[in-house]
Structures are given as C-alpha cells and as structure tokens.
Amino acid sequence: MKKNLLLILLLLCGLPGFGQETEKLMDKLNRGQKKHFLLFCQIQMATKDGKADHQKVFEAYVSVIAESCKVTQPQYQKIADNLQERADKALMNGRNEIAERVGKVAKIYTDMSQSQLNIMKAYEDKNTEATHQTLSQMQALETLMNNNRLKTLERDWLFPAEAEQFLLQSLGSKK
Amino acid sequence: MKNKQGHNKERGSALLMTLGVLALALILAMSFAFTSRASRTISKVNADMIRARLLAQSGLNRLIAAMYNDNVNTPGYYLARKGGNLDFTGSITKSDAVIKYLNMGGDSSDASETENSLHAILARHDNYAKQLYTGCSGFAPTGFQTYFDDEGKVMGRIGFVVIEESGKIDLNQVLNLRTEANNMPFVWADNPRIYHGTGTFNAATDFYYNILWGYQPGTQVDETNTQRVGLHMQELRVAASYLSALPATSVANRKAQWMSYDHLLNSISYTANNTTFDDDILHYTFFSGEEPEAYWDQSAETAVPGTGERQRFDITGYEWRDDALGSYYTTAGGTHPNPATSGWQHPSESGTANASAYARSLAAALRSGSQPFWNTSVDPPEPADVNRISGATIPADFSGIPWLNTLQPDSVRPQVAANLVDYCDSDSWATIPNTVTWTSTTEPEYCGNEKVPYFNEVALAVVAEKAVTLTPDYTFRLRIIPRVELVHIFGPPGPTGDLHSGDFQVRIIGTYQLIDNMGTIIHDDPLNQIFSFSNKPDVKSYSYDMTMVNPTDPSTIVYEETRSDDIDGATFNLHITQVIMISGTVNNEDQIKDYGFWAGDVTTSIMATTTPHQTQYASLEVADPRFNHRSDSWAWYGGGTVFSPNIAHHTIFTNNSNFNPQNDGTNTTKDIETFTGLALNSTFSTAFIRNAPMESLWELGAIHRGAPWQTLNLRSFGTTGNYADGDAMILDQVKIGPVKFSRGKYNANAINPEVCNELLSGIHLMSPYDDVTTWNPTPPTLPGTITWKPVSEFRGQIANTLAAWGGTTDQRIEAWIGRTANLLSTRNDCYTIFVVAQAMQELPGIDATNFSAVRDSVINPTAYNVSGTDRYCSILATQILRAHLVRDAWRNTYQIVQQRYLE
C-alpha cells in the first residue's frame, strides 16, 4: 500500500506543471490528509482502469474516516455537552439570548458528533449510500462551523468532494 | 289193513310240509315286509336328506342371487360392504381383529332350543365355525328363513351365514412355497403370472421382485428376512411355522398348500400348544382370487362396455421397453435394474439431440391414456400386450398414466411427466423443451428435476463508479456483480454424495440509462449481461455453494464511458426484466442440468460517485429450488425493497427468506415437512432422485409436482387433480413389474384393523427411499378412532385412512400408502358361506301346552318362532353346505373356490 502511494505521489509530482502549485496546494493538507488524498488519487486511477473493487475502495477510503471519527466524535460530543451546559446555565441566569446562541452552537456540535457516529455505523454496515449522505452532511456542518468561526477538530482525512475538488485544482493548475 | 295202517302213518306229512311252506312263506313275507318297511324308511330318510340338500343348494343359489341382484342399484361395480347393499352387520372379533358376517333370515329357535340354534348346528359340524363361535366373540347367527308347503305347513328352513374373508391375508400367497435358494418371486419373460414352476430366475430375460432389498435374486427368501417394500405379498412376514407345518410335495423343495380351514385348524405342527392358527383365525385364510393387474375406468366402461379395465403402467419400465435390449439388469454390485435397458432413457445415447428428443417424447407419451386390458379380438379375451418401444421409437398408442393428464393446474402436467423421466433415467441432463437453449429468453414450459445442484439465489451488487483522472477526464461506469448460490438438496452426506454443477451462466436482461441531475438522458441502452462460470467444484450434500464474479471482471461492466466533461449528479437508472440461469455444458442445449428463470421488472437509481462507489444490493431467491424454472417461484429479497444499500441484503448461505414449507399439517397446499421456521441447510424429506427406475410405488411421492413444496400427494385420494385433494389415484394406474395377473392381494375395502396393522408391519418410517432394510417390528399405533373411508373401486382411496396413522413428514406419511398400494386390491371379495338346510315336518296338534310331553317321542323336535308364530316341528334331515367364494366386485361375477357338504 505504501509503495503504491509513493508511486502515485511520484506520478503526480512528475507531471508537468504539477510542481510548485501542487506543492502549495499540498501544503494546505496535514500529513494524514495528504495520505488520504493520495489514496483518493489511487482509487481514481484504479477506477478509471476498471480495477477498483467497490468493497475494497469503500474499506480503504472510509476506514480512515471511521477510525478518525472514533477519536473525534467523543471530543465533539464533549464540546457539545459543555456548550449545552453553558446554555442551560445561561438560561437559568435569565440570559436567554446567550442561552439561545450557545444552544444553537451546542446543537451544531451535537449534530457533528451524531454524524460521526453515523459514519461509524455506515462503515460498519458497508453502506455506501449512508456513508455518502452522512459525509455530505458532515461536510456541510463543517462549512457551517467554519463560516461561524467555530472550532473544528483537525481531521487527517478528506471528504470525497473535497478530495475531488483538490484533485481538480491540482489538475487545473497543471493545465 | 297193514297197508292201510301204513298209509295212516304218512297222513300228517303234507300238513307239516304245508305248514313248513307256509312258515317259510310267512318268513319270506315278513322278510319282504320288513325289508320293504326298512326300504321305505330309508327312502323317506333319503328323501328328507335330498330335500334338505336341495334346500341347501337352492339356499346357496339364492344367496348368490341376492348378492348378484343388488347390482341393479349400483351398476358397474359394488362391494358387499357398501351401504345399502347386503348388510354385513355381524362382527366377529378377537383382540383388534374384526371380520364381518351376514345372517339372512329372522326366524329363530326358542331360547331353550340351544342345540337347534343356527350357530350351535354350525359349531357341531364345522371346526372353523366352532372356532369362530368358541374362540372369538360375536359369532352367534340365529336366524333361519322358513319354507312352507301349499297348506301353509312348515316343510323346511334355511340358515344363511356369509362371512366376509376379504380382510384376511391368504397364507398361500404370503408364504414362499419354494424353499430353495433363488426363490425370489419373479416373472418369466412373456409370462403373465408370477412363476411357480421348477425353473429359476434368469437375469437375462426375467423380472424379479426385490423383496429382500439386497439386489441378489439368488438369495433365499424365508419368513424372517423379507423387507417391507410394497412389491409383492410374499414380503409380508407370518410365523415360520405356517411354512414348516406344510408337507413337502413330490417335487423337491416345494411345499404343499393350505387346503382348508380344517387343514389349518388340525395341523399339529405349528407350535407345542398348537394354538397358532386359533389365535390367527381372523388374520389368515387359505384362499383368494386371481385378478387382472388393471384399474377401473368407469367412463371407458360406459363408452364401450367391456373396456373398463385398463392397463396399469409398469413403473419399472420392464413391460414397455424394447425387449430386444436384453437383460433388464446390471450385475454391478448385485442385480440392479439397469436404466439403459429399462426404456426410461434412449437405448444407446446420452446428452445428444436424439437422447433429448427421446426423453421429451417419453414424457409426452406418459401422459397418454392407457390401453384396454383385454384383447377382445380373441375368444376368450386375453390380456393385451402393452405397446412397446421399438428402438428409440415410442409408439403413438403408448399406454401411459392417465392421472398425469388429470393434474391441475394443466401447466404442471408436462413438468410432472418430465420429472418422472429424469427420476428414472441415469443421466443428469434435464428433460426440457427443445426451444430452450443457452441463449433463449422464454420461460420453459417444463424442466425435469435431475439430481444436480439447483440455482437457489442470485445476489446482485449494482455499482456506479465515477473517476476523475488526468487531463482531467471523467469516467462513468455501471457494474452488475452477481453472486450465484447453488443448493444441493440431496443426500447422502459425505464426499460420495457431492454433486457437480458443471458449467453455468447467469444472464441479466433489462435496460439502463445514464442521466444527469436535470433528468437529461445521456445514455439509454438495453441490458444483456452474461456471466459465465466454468468447471466449478462439487457442491457438498445438503449445503449451499456460492460462486461470485470478481468485482473487477470485465464481464461485470454494463456501461463505461470516459469523457472530458463532468456530468452533474450522474445517475444510473437500471431496469432488470429477466434473470436466466442455466447449467450444464456450455452452449449445448442437449446437456442442460438446471434452468432458472425469472421475469418481471425491478428498478433502481444509483448516483455515480468518486468514492466510495455507490452500491445497491438485490437478491433474487427461489422458494423451492426444484421449481426454479418458473418465474413465479422466484421473489426478490426484502419484499417491497428490492434494492438496498445494505450489503447484507441477501440470504446467501442461509435459507431463502421465501423458503417456507409447512410443518403443522394445516396447509393443504404444501407437503408436510419438519422444518420449524428457517433452518440452515434444511432440505425436503422427499428430495430423492434414484437415477434409475423406481423400485416401489412410494417413490412416486418424491416426484415434484410443479409448484413450490408440492410433490405428488400420495397422502390423499381425490378425483379433481388438485394437489390438496390428493394424487393417490395414480396408485391405481401403476404397478411394479410386468405381471398381468396377481393373487391374494389384501382388499382395501375390508375393515380388519389388526390385519391392516399387520399389513403395515415392517414399514420403518425413518427409512429413506433407497434403503428400506430396517424392519420395524412394532406395527403402527392405531389411532383411537379409525375413520374408515367409504368403499371404492380405487385402492388409492386407502390413503385417506392411512394418512392418519402417523408420520411427521410427507415422505414418512406416504410410506404407509406408497409401500402398501401394490399389495392392495379392491376387486376380489372373499366369502365363506354356510347354508344350513333342514327338512322339517310340523307336528300336528302340538302347541306350547303339550310340546314338552311329546318331545321325547318324536324325532328331533324343535320349537321356533316364525314371524311371531311359534312352530313345533320335527327336524327330519339337516344338510350343511360350506362354500368358499370369490366375488369379482367390478364385474359382479362369482367363483366357487371350494364347496362341501358337511356330514
């Protein structure tokens, strides 16, 4: 697997125009995300060649996400619980506006936690449809959190749409 | 004077002489008178005796006439026991054995006239009647019919007693009177009867009844080593002393026969206390009638009188095969029936177009009507030979099994016929219409069940792939990845029972589209995906085997396109309208092992994504794999949810979700099995294919009936042809072997529970079809209340009674009837008749007041009541006639087997 990843990386880096711009793009990714992206690229190439086993693709790509979620989901849940606690206190203190605002944020974190649970379940069930839907929801939540400057936990994987966009950007820069 | 004196001396001699002559004359006269008187007395006694004898003879004729004339009310056939006919109301019982008797006449002797009652007279003069009277219960006939002269005086009376013996077993037919080796009952070629001569079985030409189940016709049959298969009466076991007690004959190794009840009762050789036959008196008889191996077709009889008897179909194939084929047997491992020379398959080819055509022709011919039994072109008529197959040509007027063309619904008829052919032939190539090929797409009318793995489930993974790669370019792909489950429903477990599926292919037909998120159709094509599998390993007994296609195999690709622009929301719409499975030898329509077919319309939509690849799962399951060639036997897993993203949306390696046989006996549309819900590796009790000719009628119950969980229903008798009403009628239309006449079969209309029970002894319900070597010494437990079904001309009707006698599965319940039917008759009724005729003279001037005063001074006085009036008579002479009679219930004819006046 590692050997294949290296080959993909070398292949990508060896392409004309894939040099500095790509490197800049890659710099935006952490180590895990880079690895996940390379896996994505490998899947794309295998898929194009008709050599991608749908179950192996699922296993390889989603297992990284599911494993990561096992770690981040309790953290998201803890944040959500703390926020909810604060919201409850604010409500008890009659600070209704703050309570409402904090409560909404807590809800977002709770949803994120739930999505991560859903991902783990979908992975366990090998359910591609649920995986796809949940990842889309999770990505939308994360965008929402980013837009509202809410703290997101670092993840060492990429959403498929993110990876696809990233790949297109890379290829676009190649042009 | 001297002379005168001398003359005087001679004077009295004349007188003396005269006196002497007179005395002599007197003596002579007295002698004549005495002689005359004696002669007159003798003449009178003789006249009385003759009068009594004539009365007895007329009594017998009257009795037969009474039985015969009842036919007016029930034309065609009738049985004496049938309601509304002769009234056999008397019951003679001993333990659970019961035989019925009829006593005509209502005039009975006075209670004090014990010595003149009918049963007392019989008991005094006949051992059999005595044993019935003293050793059993219920035999006490009393009624006479009285005959009067012109003056209204009693001139005689007749007592009629008819004992129905049909519910007994004829010892002479159950015993094997040939006591040497090689004494298995067999039929000599071209001989219509079981062979009883001094010759021995010849495997090259003859047919034998494998009643030892050892396939060794040279083995000696005795009364302890037979098996209860349902082939021949000799397989019933009776006490060996019944054979040893018989004297030898002048022919070596031949025993004499039992000749009479006296013979049986008087034999001292049974046991030390000589009670064997006393105990068995209601079980066994010594006589029976011969009957044609024919079944009764009332419609044929009505159309053409005399043709109601029709040929039974020999399920062994011996009778109708081309007899130029040589021996019916193969000697490998014993003398087994050889399918290749049985007529059940092409005589020389297998897996060829000719062999396929032969199987199809035979399956069609099996559904033909049957020939009349009698050849009426000769006088007297003889049993007709059935029309034989010649070479590979099946005659147009082949004598088949009409019941097959009665089955409902009509569509199952060719299927059942094909199943029969494939059960009995030795190959593994299914009998299937010649329109079916490896590329055909129509539902086959039939597909015979062979002993092969069957298609049981096809699980599909439908994958929509999208790839973004260099340039950039975009690849869209639709795949269908099948997994095919085969099931091996046959035993035995273990390597020897494994089955080879050979090559097979699955074909999926339908349409598919590629659309964008606006619904614009980008691609629209028919779907015709073929997945081929070759040289698959054997499937283990009673287990599933799954074969899957490599998910990246090119054969899985339905659609594939690489383009430079993306398709927003690229989605595949898939319609599947047919799934066709076929196994055998690729592209050889004459070597098809199994054929699965489903048609309908199921659809799914899947968006193509880069990762993970969207996948939908669907699984097509067959309810009963023996019936997988018909679309309505298949259903998609999940009910209304055909496609699911759940990878576990299938039942590979477990029972199908629509595998739903019944086990509680309440569903009359399915066989009864022991399954409780879904159980891994469950199979059917009737899952058995011999790949050789049937060896008992029981095996008919293993023939699949062309609907899920239905095999031929031997558990019930009906005439509609519906499964629920039963198929036991077929048991009348088939036979084992080529015999044209049989003797001593048990009358299915008789009601003798203990003998019925004895008839079933030895049948072990746990025995499989191919091994009946376990003799069950415990007879079936009779139900508390036995519901005896109405009498019938069909022996199969006994199914309705026996089905209640136990068994937990279809196979086991059918064992009772299937392993008994060929031992049953409905035709011959056996009777023992006693006619007690007495010449009588009414005593003048005698009534109740003075009868006792004169009874010591008259010969054989008796007082009895005639229609309410006391009559006082002298019995002048008594004649007792005992006759053993066989009545043909179908033709209403009578044959006196034995007749005797008892002294």
Image: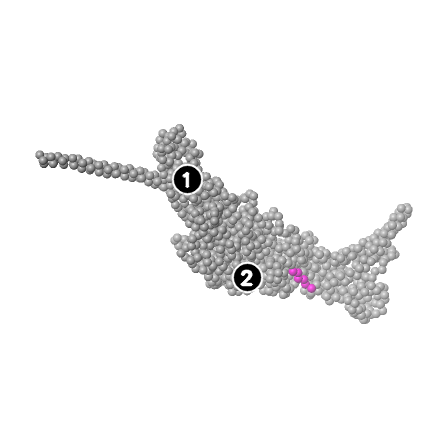
> Mark 2 belongs to which subunit?
B
Front residue of A51/B826: it is B826
Label 2 in the same subunit as label 1: yes
Which badge, 2 or 1, comes first in the chain's sequence? Answer: 1
Q: Secondary structure at mark 1?
A: helix
Whether residue B25 sits left or right of residue B381 in the image: it is left
Mark 1, residue position: B121
Q: Secondary structure at mark 2?
A: loop
Residue B547 part of the magenta segment: yes
Residue B44 at what x, y percent from top left? 32, 38
Q: What amino acid is found at the position of numbered circle 1 in the picture?
A: Ile
Image: magenta residue range? B545-550
Residue at numbered disc 2: B426
Three-letter amino acid code at the position of disc 2: Ser
**Quarter that holds the C terminus of chain B:** top left
- What residue is at 42 percent from the left and 58 percent from the top? B252
